[in-house]
Amino acid sequence: MTERLKQHSELWVCAFLLLLGGLVLVDAISIPADFTQRGPVGPKAVPFLVGGLLVLVSVLLAVDVLRGGKGEAEAGEDVDLDAPADWRTVLLLAAAFLANIVLINLVGFPVSGMVLFWGSAYALGSRNFVRDPLVAAGLSIVTYVVFNNLLGVHLPGGPLMGVL
């Protein structure tokens, strides 16, 4: 019996995907229809699509597994599994995210986003102290303008509220 379970262990993934898809569909049903409806596609469309695709993928994967299909084992990547974790990078990235959380309501998204982008670039090894802040400022301002002006998702502007 345990040998049969080992041969079809991928069915647990199918069951998880089916359960997740079902939860998404049940949750999508409970979304009120008049909730910020702005056009022909309401707020239920994407959850129904995602839930339906999760259910479909789980069924297709289960059929493949039951017909004898198996996932290939990882061939390996260029990763040394015996090397210790790089905690310095993890902590620097966490600091950049925490700085963004603390600063966003104080100085607005353009400045806090710049700190986030610049801090992330520094944590991941970039050391160009002229280019990095300029790219970070550009990314932050473009992100702010796209979300605030084009998508209608209002982010805190801070002192730059009247400028952007």
Image (spheres, helix red, strand yellow):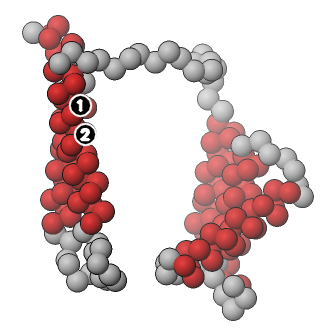
On screen, residue 123 versus residue 7, left or right, reads right
Graded by Cα atoms within 10 Å as few (under 14), some (14 to 19) or many (20 or more), the crowding at tag 2 reads some
The residue indicated by pointer 2 is 57
Amino acid under disc 1: Leu
Q: CA distance from mark 2 to mark 1?
A: 6 Å
Image quarter of the N terminus: top left
Amino acid under disc 2: Val
Residue drawn 17% across the image and 36% down it: 59
The answer to whether mark 2 and mark 1 are in CB contact below 8 A is yes
Residue drawn 67% across the image and 71% down it: 142
120 vs 143, nearest the viewer: 143
Q: Which mark, by number, is residue 48? A: none
In the rendered image, which quarter is residue 129 located in? bottom right
- Does any portion of residue 145 appear in the rendered image? yes
27 vs 119, nearest the viewer: 27
The x and y percentages for residue 94 are 61, 51
The x and y percentages for residue 40 are 29, 78
41 to 122, vertically: above or below: below
The residue indicated by pointer 1 is 61
The x and y percentages for residue 120 are 69, 52
In the rendered image, which quarter is residue 38 located in? bottom left
- Does any portion of residue 159 appear in the rendered image? no
The x and y percentages for residue 134 are 82, 64
Residue drawn 17% across the image and 27% down it: 63
Graded by Cα atoms within 10 Å as few (under 14), some (14 to 19) or many (20 or more), the crowding at tag 1 reads many
